[in-house]
Image (cartoon, rainbow, N blue to C red):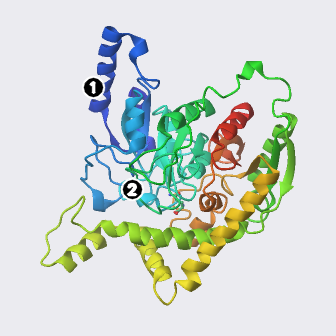
Amino acid sequence: LSRLHRTEPSVRSFIHVAEAAAQREAEELDRRIASEGKDALGPLAGVLVGVKDNLCTANMPSTGGSRILEGYQPAYDATAVRLLREAGAIVVGKTNLDEFGMGSTTEGSAFQVTKNPWDDSRVPGGSSGGSASAVSARQCVVSLGSDTGGSVRQPASFCGVVGLKPTYGRVSRFGLMAYASSLDVVGCFGSSVFDTATILSVVSGHDKMDSTSSSQDVPDYASELVSLDSLESKPLNGLRIGIIQETLGEGVDIGVASSIKAAASHLEQLGSVVEEVSLPSFSLGLPAYYILASSEASSNLSRYDGIRYGRQISADDLNELYGESRANGLGHEVKMRILMGTYALSAGYYDAYYKRAQQVRTLVKESFKGALERFDILVSPAAPSAAYKIGEKINDPLAMYAGDIMTVNVNLAGLPALVVPCGFVEGGPAGLPIGLQMIGSPFSEGNLLRVGHIFE
Ligand code: GLN
């Protein structure tokens, strides 16, 4: 907590720090250790976690980074949060994000700008920027984020931490404020693969409150990691790795491409077979993603009507109440997405945009499926560059969207992906971190984590 306090004024990862609650929970743990002994406690007893502020927490405000939810305190915990607490973790606060998860820099928060701990003139990435910077600055041990189109993986890369986007359905979405329901997943951040694997096991599993959550068994991911000192010289023998060709060409910083190539040759030295693989539909994923995500958002965000949650205003009639609440409560990017989504879904344009984007989604899914029959893991950068300067992209939405090219396809296909730090490029006082993205077949989180752990 004292480290959190010392670093928070400059990093600003948290919208809300729950110091008193954290202190009380820690004291309660001490009491239980005294009366029942250490063994009675859960596997995460006393571990400080940060939770992205679009996940509901019963004892803390939950704003989704939006003015429209200012003052809103949910009546329940999101399932992932409840499971962490049941395992003994202490939620230390709610982390900053782009409003409702829409953005790639965390500058889209209605409340504050979060700084990248590696260079305070740069963004931490987004939209889960606060969760990534909090782990990177060691303000908490692990954190939860959400990933609709890259929001765990890109900030993990920008902040030099481990980030995992699970298979769609692996973790319950109950209590996650819906952005694009067919793409949204709750994801995990840690400073190591081991920590990330540990919380993934805790938050995964079927939940009767989310009909899309999977009832596949949840492995103890951390215990399946191979102990590093028992490793032979070629621990990845037999593993087939495909480097996605389309991710190392034009538009990708030279330093990023060479870090990824160096990572690939490291994986080769560890015994795996590394080849290039082409996914011709790769570049189609980006426009399809922005059509589909905005369409779903335009529907999901209709719940913020000024009546059900958050800020209350007075108005003379219902239309004025809706209009004023949304005009003042929602930010520019969110309004733009609602407009784009409403347009794409409207009667005259549905076939040209929404339907077409759904067809591209099928194409993307199929091309990943084919590639993952030939390879166990596909690798790419997590982002085409290192962290952006604060302000660099905020007034250029298309440039901002283009930066998501490496991550959005994975959400369209519902696949799991792990990002691990793999190098640095020039920039900032001490270089800027770069992340390697490893993509696997559905429910192959265990394999991704095992390889990530050996690589790390
Ligand atoms: N940057 C992407 C978007 O704005 C992804 C965000 C996310 O994964 N929540 O939609």
* Front position among marks 1 and 2: 2
Residue 181 has which mark? none
How far apart in space, not on screen, are marks 1 and 2 (Cα)?
A: 27 Å
Label 2 SS = loop
Indicate the amino acid at tag 2.
Met
Position in image of residue 193 (x %, y %): 62, 34
Question: Is the CB of the residue bearing disc 2 within 8 angstroms of ligand 1?
Answer: no
Position in image of residue 413 (x %, y %): 63, 60
In the figure, is residue 260 to the left or right of 205? right
Q: Is residue 269 above or below residue 179?
A: above
Position in image of residue 393 (x %, y %): 55, 64
In the figure, is residue 88 to the left or right of 383? left
Question: Is the CB of the residue bearing disc 1 within 8 angstroms of ligand 1?
Answer: no
Dot 1 or dot 2: first in sequence order is: 1
Q: Residue furthest bottom?
A: 348
Instruction: Provide the residue designation for mark 1.
Output: 24
Query: Dot 1: within a 10 Å radius of its alpha carbon, few (fewer than 14), some, or many (20 or more) residues?
Result: few
Q: Quadrant of residue 329?
A: bottom left
Indicate the amino acid at tag 1.
Arg
Q: Residue at x 37, y 34 (%)?
A: 92
Q: Residue at x 81, y 34 (%)?
A: 236
In the figure, is residue 333 to the left or right of 351? left
Numbered disc total: 2
**Is residue 199 visible from the viewing direction of this image?**
yes
Position in image of residue 374 (x %, y %): 82, 52
Q: In which quarter of the image is residue 362?
A: bottom right
Looking at the rendered image, the quarter that the N terminus falls into is: top left
Instruction: Provide the residue designation for mark 2.
Output: 177
Q: In this view, does 347 lie above or below 20?
A: below
Q: Residue at x 58, y 43 (%)?
A: 163
